[in-house]
Amino acid sequence: MENSTTKAITAYKLIRDGILCGEFLPGSRLVLMDLEKKLGLGRGPIRDALMRLDRSGLIEHIPFKGAIVKKPPSIGELKYIYDTRLTIERHTMLEVLEKITPRQIGVLQKMVDASLKDPQNFYFHDRKFHAYLYSIADMPHGLDIINSLNEHIDIFLNTHIYDYAYRMESIAQHQKMLDALRAKDREALIQILEANIMIGLNYIHNQIMGEG
Protein backbone atom coordinates (compact mmCIF):
# COMPACT_ATOMS: atom_id res chain seq x y z
CA MET A 1 0.00 0.00 0.00
CA GLU A 2 1.34 3.41 -0.97
CA ASN A 3 2.38 5.68 1.89
CA SER A 4 1.51 9.39 1.89
CA THR A 5 4.86 10.45 0.39
CA THR A 6 4.56 7.96 -2.47
CA LYS A 7 0.98 9.04 -3.12
CA ALA A 8 2.04 12.69 -3.20
CA ILE A 9 4.76 11.87 -5.74
CA THR A 10 2.24 9.92 -7.83
CA ALA A 11 -0.19 12.85 -7.71
CA TYR A 12 2.59 15.27 -8.66
CA LYS A 13 3.59 13.23 -11.71
CA LEU A 14 0.01 12.77 -12.88
CA ILE A 15 -0.88 16.45 -12.59
CA ARG A 16 2.46 17.56 -14.06
CA ASP A 17 2.03 15.24 -17.05
CA GLY A 18 -1.51 16.53 -17.51
CA ILE A 19 -0.19 20.09 -17.66
CA LEU A 20 2.65 19.25 -20.05
CA CYS A 21 0.50 17.26 -22.48
CA GLY A 22 -2.13 20.00 -22.61
CA GLU A 23 -4.84 18.18 -20.63
CA PHE A 24 -4.83 21.04 -18.11
CA LEU A 25 -4.58 24.19 -20.19
CA PRO A 26 -2.82 27.42 -19.13
CA GLY A 27 -5.13 29.57 -17.03
CA SER A 28 -7.33 26.67 -15.94
CA ARG A 29 -8.12 25.99 -12.27
CA LEU A 30 -6.99 22.82 -10.54
CA VAL A 31 -9.82 22.05 -8.13
CA LEU A 32 -9.06 19.63 -5.30
CA MET A 33 -12.41 17.85 -5.48
CA ASP A 34 -12.14 17.35 -9.25
CA LEU A 35 -8.57 16.07 -8.95
CA GLU A 36 -9.58 13.61 -6.21
CA LYS A 37 -12.15 12.05 -8.54
CA LYS A 38 -9.92 12.12 -11.58
CA LEU A 39 -6.78 10.69 -9.95
CA GLY A 40 -8.39 8.44 -7.36
CA LEU A 41 -6.18 9.88 -4.64
CA GLY A 42 -6.88 11.64 -1.36
CA ARG A 43 -6.90 15.37 -0.74
CA GLY A 44 -3.68 15.33 1.32
CA PRO A 45 -1.37 13.90 -1.38
CA ILE A 46 -2.96 16.14 -4.02
CA ARG A 47 -2.51 19.23 -1.85
CA ASP A 48 1.17 18.28 -1.37
CA ALA A 49 1.53 17.77 -5.11
CA LEU A 50 0.06 21.20 -5.85
CA MET A 51 2.48 22.83 -3.41
CA ARG A 52 5.39 21.15 -5.21
CA LEU A 53 4.05 22.20 -8.62
CA ASP A 54 3.79 25.76 -7.30
CA ARG A 55 7.47 25.67 -6.32
CA SER A 56 8.41 24.27 -9.73
CA GLY A 57 6.69 27.19 -11.48
CA LEU A 58 4.11 25.15 -13.40
CA ILE A 59 1.18 26.48 -11.38
CA GLU A 60 0.50 29.43 -9.12
CA HIS A 61 -1.84 29.97 -6.20
CA ILE A 62 -4.03 33.03 -6.63
CA PRO A 63 -6.13 34.38 -3.73
CA PHE A 64 -9.84 33.51 -4.03
CA LYS A 65 -9.14 31.40 -7.14
CA GLY A 66 -6.86 28.62 -5.95
CA ALA A 67 -4.32 26.71 -8.01
CA ILE A 68 -4.06 27.96 -11.60
CA VAL A 69 -1.96 26.48 -14.42
CA LYS A 70 0.59 29.13 -15.32
CA LYS A 71 0.59 30.71 -18.74
CA PRO A 72 3.52 29.81 -21.01
CA PRO A 73 6.65 31.99 -20.82
CA SER A 74 6.87 35.03 -23.09
CA ILE A 75 9.14 34.84 -26.14
CA GLY A 76 11.68 36.94 -24.21
CA GLU A 77 11.69 34.48 -21.31
CA LEU A 78 11.90 31.56 -23.69
CA LYS A 79 15.06 33.00 -25.25
CA TYR A 80 16.68 33.11 -21.79
CA ILE A 81 15.55 29.53 -21.15
CA TYR A 82 17.03 28.36 -24.44
CA ASP A 83 20.30 30.19 -23.77
CA THR A 84 20.51 28.43 -20.40
CA ARG A 85 19.72 25.10 -22.03
CA LEU A 86 22.52 25.60 -24.53
CA THR A 87 25.06 26.15 -21.76
CA ILE A 88 24.00 23.17 -19.64
CA GLU A 89 23.34 20.73 -22.47
CA ARG A 90 26.70 21.39 -24.16
CA HIS A 91 28.51 20.30 -21.00
CA THR A 92 26.17 17.34 -20.54
CA MET A 93 26.65 16.17 -24.11
CA LEU A 94 30.44 16.27 -23.79
CA GLU A 95 30.14 14.02 -20.74
CA VAL A 96 27.97 11.70 -22.82
CA LEU A 97 30.61 11.63 -25.53
CA GLU A 98 33.22 10.47 -23.00
CA LYS A 99 31.05 7.79 -21.38
CA ILE A 100 28.76 6.35 -24.05
CA THR A 101 29.17 2.68 -24.99
CA PRO A 102 28.36 0.87 -28.26
CA ARG A 103 25.43 -0.83 -26.52
CA GLN A 104 23.97 2.53 -25.48
CA ILE A 105 24.37 3.86 -29.01
CA GLY A 106 22.43 0.79 -30.17
CA VAL A 107 19.60 1.59 -27.73
CA LEU A 108 19.46 5.18 -28.98
CA GLN A 109 19.45 4.00 -32.60
CA LYS A 110 16.39 1.87 -31.91
CA MET A 111 14.69 4.95 -30.43
CA VAL A 112 15.42 6.99 -33.56
CA ASP A 113 14.16 4.16 -35.77
CA ALA A 114 10.97 3.95 -33.70
CA SER A 115 10.37 7.70 -34.01
CA LEU A 116 10.75 7.48 -37.80
CA LYS A 117 8.06 4.79 -37.90
CA ASP A 118 5.78 6.78 -35.59
CA PRO A 119 6.34 10.53 -36.16
CA GLN A 120 2.79 11.26 -35.00
CA ASN A 121 3.93 10.60 -31.42
CA PHE A 122 7.02 12.78 -31.80
CA TYR A 123 6.76 14.34 -28.33
CA PHE A 124 6.93 10.94 -26.61
CA HIS A 125 9.87 9.73 -28.72
CA ASP A 126 11.77 13.02 -28.43
CA ARG A 127 11.59 13.14 -24.64
CA LYS A 128 12.48 9.45 -24.34
CA PHE A 129 15.52 9.92 -26.61
CA HIS A 130 16.88 12.94 -24.73
CA ALA A 131 16.17 11.48 -21.28
CA TYR A 132 18.14 8.32 -22.06
CA LEU A 133 20.90 10.20 -23.88
CA TYR A 134 21.55 12.61 -21.01
CA SER A 135 21.29 9.89 -18.36
CA ILE A 136 24.52 8.48 -19.82
CA ALA A 137 26.37 11.56 -18.55
CA ASP A 138 25.61 10.39 -14.98
CA MET A 139 24.92 13.97 -13.84
CA PRO A 140 21.50 13.63 -12.16
CA HIS A 141 21.40 17.14 -10.69
CA GLY A 142 22.22 18.70 -14.04
CA LEU A 143 19.56 16.51 -15.63
CA ASP A 144 17.02 17.80 -13.10
CA ILE A 145 17.79 21.36 -14.24
CA ILE A 146 17.43 20.40 -17.91
CA ASN A 147 14.10 18.67 -17.22
CA SER A 148 12.81 21.68 -15.27
CA LEU A 149 13.70 24.07 -18.11
CA ASN A 150 12.05 21.77 -20.65
CA GLU A 151 8.83 21.63 -18.63
CA HIS A 152 8.32 25.37 -19.10
CA ILE A 153 8.92 24.99 -22.84
CA ASP A 154 6.54 22.03 -23.04
CA ILE A 155 3.70 24.12 -21.61
CA PHE A 156 3.87 26.13 -24.83
CA LEU A 157 4.65 23.36 -27.29
CA ASN A 158 1.84 21.10 -26.13
CA THR A 159 -0.82 23.74 -26.73
CA HIS A 160 0.29 23.72 -30.39
CA ILE A 161 0.57 21.05 -33.04
CA TYR A 162 4.03 20.01 -34.16
CA ASP A 163 4.04 20.25 -37.94
CA TYR A 164 5.40 17.32 -39.95
CA ALA A 165 8.48 19.15 -41.24
CA TYR A 166 9.51 20.14 -37.70
CA ARG A 167 9.14 16.58 -36.46
CA MET A 168 11.12 15.06 -39.31
CA GLU A 169 13.91 17.62 -39.08
CA SER A 170 14.27 16.97 -35.35
CA ILE A 171 14.41 13.21 -35.89
CA ALA A 172 17.05 13.68 -38.60
CA GLN A 173 19.10 15.72 -36.12
CA HIS A 174 18.85 12.90 -33.57
CA GLN A 175 20.35 10.58 -36.18
CA LYS A 176 23.18 13.02 -36.86
CA MET A 177 23.91 13.19 -33.11
CA LEU A 178 24.28 9.42 -33.05
CA ASP A 179 26.56 9.49 -36.09
CA ALA A 180 28.76 12.10 -34.37
CA LEU A 181 28.83 10.04 -31.16
CA ARG A 182 29.89 6.96 -33.11
CA ALA A 183 32.64 8.94 -34.82
CA LYS A 184 33.68 10.64 -31.53
CA ASP A 185 33.38 13.92 -33.44
CA ARG A 186 33.17 16.52 -30.68
CA GLU A 187 32.80 19.58 -32.94
CA ALA A 188 30.06 18.07 -35.11
CA LEU A 189 28.21 16.80 -32.04
CA ILE A 190 28.02 20.22 -30.42
CA GLN A 191 26.97 21.88 -33.68
CA ILE A 192 24.15 19.38 -34.15
CA LEU A 193 23.07 19.70 -30.51
CA GLU A 194 22.87 23.49 -30.83
CA ALA A 195 20.87 23.18 -34.05
CA ASN A 196 18.50 20.69 -32.40
CA ILE A 197 17.90 23.00 -29.45
CA MET A 198 17.46 26.14 -31.52
CA ILE A 199 15.02 24.54 -33.94
CA GLY A 200 12.61 24.49 -30.99
CA LEU A 201 12.99 28.20 -30.28
CA ASN A 202 12.62 29.05 -33.97
CA TYR A 203 9.50 26.89 -34.14
CA ILE A 204 7.98 28.66 -31.13
CA HIS A 205 8.84 32.06 -32.56
CA ASN A 206 7.19 31.18 -35.89
CA GLN A 207 4.10 29.86 -34.08
CA ILE A 208 3.77 33.09 -32.10
CA MET A 209 4.28 35.24 -35.20
CA GLY A 210 1.65 33.18 -36.99
CA GLU A 211 -0.83 33.90 -34.22
CA GLY A 212 -0.10 37.60 -34.19
Image: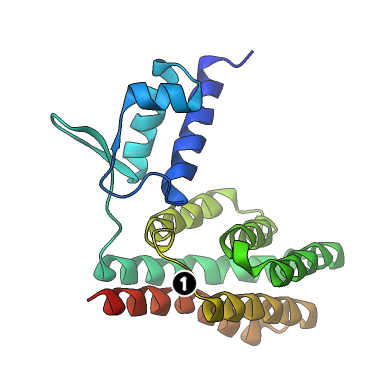
Seen in the picture, residue 58 relative to 13 is either above or below; the reply is: below
Seen in the picture, residue 78 relative to 40 is either above or below; the reply is: below
Residue placed at 42% from the left, 77% from the top?
203
**SS category of the residue bearing label 1:** helix
Residue placed at 42% from the left, 22% from the top?
36
- The answer to which of 36 and 88 lies nearer the viewer is 36
**Which quadrant of the structure image shows residue 79?**
bottom left
Left or right: where 98 falls relative to 37: right
Which image quarter holds the C terminus?
Answer: bottom left
Left or right: where 179 falls relative to 2: right
How many numbered discs, if any?
1
Which image quarter holds the N terminus?
Answer: top right
- How crowded pointer 1 is (Cα within 10 Å; few <14, some 14-19, many 20+) is rated as some
Say which residue label 1 marks. Answer: 86
Seen in the picture, residue 177 relative to 137 is either above or below; the reply is: below
Residue placed at 33% from the left, 77% from the top?
205
**Amino acid bearing label 1:** Leu
